[in-house]
């Protein structure tokens, strides 16, 4: 017996896709500007992936502020711990990524883009100050900007669903 293929998710209304894109771009431009001011533009890849979740899939559990902020900060801390043990190596980055994933799962703050924060720490060896405060600020600002679409123009899913 074969099972039918899963039903395809309905396509979002074009205005919702446009709204998500505009808010994600605005959030990332703000965060990129802050990163450039403090000479830490390395946060763009992990935070860009987080913006895609917050604005493109705001109803998912991994998009919620607790997961967004907690996941990135936990992964960053694990990145620094791994860096101390392995040095800045590709092997260390791989180990940090796996450890970050497991720790996020155990702490109930799973946020898949945060794994990249651990990798960035190991591969780039940024000074913890200002990297960790910038990471915290970036995720808090991203969550705050995530509040706007549901309050300006009626995004179909309010964000956040939980804290």
Image: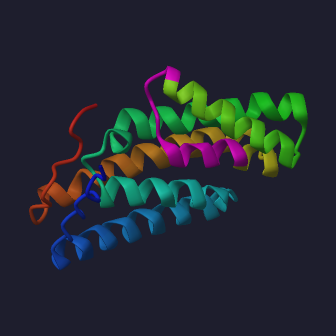
Task: Name the residue located 58 percent from the left edge and 25 percent from the top edge.
Answer: 103
* Left-right relation of 154 to 138: left
Left or right relative to 74: residue 9: left
Where is the C terminus found, in terms of image quarters? top left
x, y percentage for residue 11? 21, 71
Q: Is residue 1 left or right of residue 123?
A: left
Q: Residue at x 53, y 49 (%)?
A: 113
Q: Residue furthest front?
A: 1
In the rendered image, residue 114 lying in the magenta stretch gets the answer: yes
Q: Depth check: give the residue in front, 105 or 34.
A: 105
Residue 60: x and y in percent read: 30, 45
Is residue 33 placed above or below 151 in the rendered structure?
below
Q: Main secondary structure of the magenta part?
A: helix
Residue plotted at (54% across, 39% down): 72
Magenta span contains residue 156: no
| Picture coordinates of residue 152, whole percent (x, y) | 13, 62
Q: Of residues 155 and 97, which is closer to you in this image?
A: 97
**Residue 37 can be seen, yes or no:** yes
Q: Which residues are magenta?
A: 106-119
Whether residue 92 is situated above or below residue 26 in the rendered picture: above
* Residue at (9, 61) in percent of width and height: 154
């Amino acid at each position: 017996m074969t099972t039918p293929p899963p039903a395809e998710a309905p396509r979002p209304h074009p205005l919702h896709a446009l709204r998500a894109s505009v808010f994600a771009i605005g959030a990332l431009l703000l965060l990129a500007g802050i990163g450039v001011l403090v000479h830490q533009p390395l946060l763009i890849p992990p935070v860009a992936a987080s913006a895609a979740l917050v604005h493109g899939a705001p109803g998912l559990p991994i998009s919620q502020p607790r997961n967004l902020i907690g996941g990135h900060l936990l992964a960053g801390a694990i990145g620094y711990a791994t860096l101390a043990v392995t040095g800045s190596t590709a092997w260390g980055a791989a180990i940090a990524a796996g450890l970050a994933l497991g720790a996020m799962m155990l702490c109930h703050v799973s946020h898949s883009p945060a794994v990249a924060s651990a990798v960035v720490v190991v591969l780039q060896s940024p000074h913890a100050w200002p990297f960790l405060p910038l990471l915290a600020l970036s995720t808090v600002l991203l969550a705050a900007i995530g509040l706007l679409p549901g309050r300006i123009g009626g995004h179909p899913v309010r964000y956040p669903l939980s804290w």
